[in-house]
Amino acid sequence: MITSILTYIFTAITIAPIVYILITKNVIRAVFSLAFSFLGLSGLYVLLNAEFMAVVQLLIYAGGIIVLMVFGLMLTKTTLNKGFITQHRSLFFGSLVSFLLFISLAALAAQSRFKVGFIEQTGDPVAQIGQLFLTDFIIAFEVVAFLLLVALVGASYLAKKSGE
Amino acid sequence: MITFLFFLPFILLIVVIGVYSERKIAAFIQSRYGPMEVGPKGIIQSIADLVKMLQKEDIKPDNVDKPLFLVAPLIVFAAIFAGFSVLPMTIEIGGAQIHTGLFFLLAIVSLDVLGILMAGWGSNNKYSYYGAMRAVAQIVSYEIPLGLSVLGVVMFTQTLDLQEISSQQGIGSLIFGLSTGYQVSGFLAWNVFQMPILWVSFLIFFIAGLAESNRTPFDLPESESEIIGGYHTEYSGFRWGIFMLSEYAMMLLVSFLAAILFFGGWQTPFPNIGPLKLYDMTTGTEWGVFWLVLKVIGFIFIQIWIRWSYPRLRVDQLMSLSWKYLTPASIIILFIVGIWKLIIV
């Protein structure tokens, strides 16, 4: 009972900011409302017993990506007083495309057989995830690690170039 | 529930006492009296200040971005306060029982950056803007040595649950992770004595913690002489008070974490020596709270002491300290702890 009420609340927290992003013309407010949407999403993960996933969602998306986006906005040349205001462009085609996308995604979701209900959590999820990373998913894990290393080296190279 | 019932009043109390003791310690260090007028030895000074602050007008400048400006202090405080939910006070009062306790704490506390950015941007003021940029750059950079130094402890204790980490530092038979055959208890079972390299880890953690809570020598985001007051320049009255409260809450949180991760949490420092059962005598619910709070107050005292002893760093010094010294050092410590763990298993 209380779980389903919480599910509705968190779904509302996830969706309402997204609707606000569609309506608003102020980019910086849109970015901050996206952060609230991520918080709602992480609440939904907790309700689905995916505690580790929820914390990762908080750390990477709400803490990391949003800060990156705000920094990106703030470093672009702008006048401080006006803020970032955009216009709503090509409303008709935009809504048409997104409506079609929604229809096709909804059709896919209706066809697939999702397992409904909660998966019982036994033992320490962090230890289990760690063991799976280093056994069953070792190649994917190593590839991701290598990709991140390449990205880091590339980023520092670019930073050095622009500094000199 | 314990977060609201215990920690919220506790933070308020610590702020009132902390402000007073900060001014008194500062006065002592600088050979002057400090607050003397209100009450005996000026003891009611911070309560008087609090009342004055609450009576002030809540000024909302015309050109601010209203929603961002108004909600920013709440986000900063809520993010830091959420971190308190997983702290264990004693063996019975364990906080939120989640497996990812420490990870959750670091993740949720890192969200205060969002509130600072909102305040800096929403204030529509150059100084606030620069203050917010500095604060965020600083907090994001110092999260890396902070996280890595904590990871050393996690690797050694093999759990993220703060209650589990505290319990492990109680009574056992291990020294440096090796079995001795004798009973080891008290301070000898603490992580810094079990794994002496963690002393370095603790130093890194403490320095990064100072930076995270924007304390001197890392108070560039609010340096009065350069950028007025940083991201809270435009705030007044109660909203400014929330920023102040958040800073002290962050100090408190860092101190709690240091005590739990490195110095045994709610465990007593006294070991059992032969027939003299000092450990058993000083263990219990009330004792647990007492020891933890005592350790925390000790760390807060050190933070205040450092504030009045060191000058502020420059921005480039700040960044090179984090990236060129603390981060590599904490990676090396992580490596050593890992190797040691491999050897003794």
Image (cartoon, coloured by chain):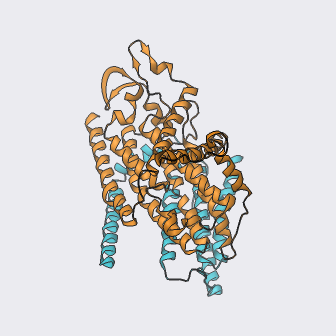
Chain colours: A cyan, B orange
Residue found at the very far top of the displayed protein: B275
Q: Quadrant of residue A160?
A: bottom left
Q: Position of residue B112 (x, y in %)?
A: 55, 58
Q: Nearer the viewer, residue B302 or A83?
A: B302
Q: Position of residue A161 (x, y in %)?
A: 30, 77
Quadrant in which the C terminus of chain B appears: top left
Q: Quadrant of residue A82?
A: bottom right
Q: Position of residue B340 (x, y in %)?
A: 27, 39
Name the residue at 57% across, 69% down.
B120
Q: Is residue B179 visible?
A: yes
Q: Is residue B98 left or right of residue B62?
A: left
Is B243 rendered above or below residue A24?
above
Name the residue at 56% across, 69% down.
B128
Is B323 rendered above or below residue B209?
below
Name the residue at 64% across, 56% down.
B241
Q: Nearer the viewer, residue A138 or A144?
A: A144
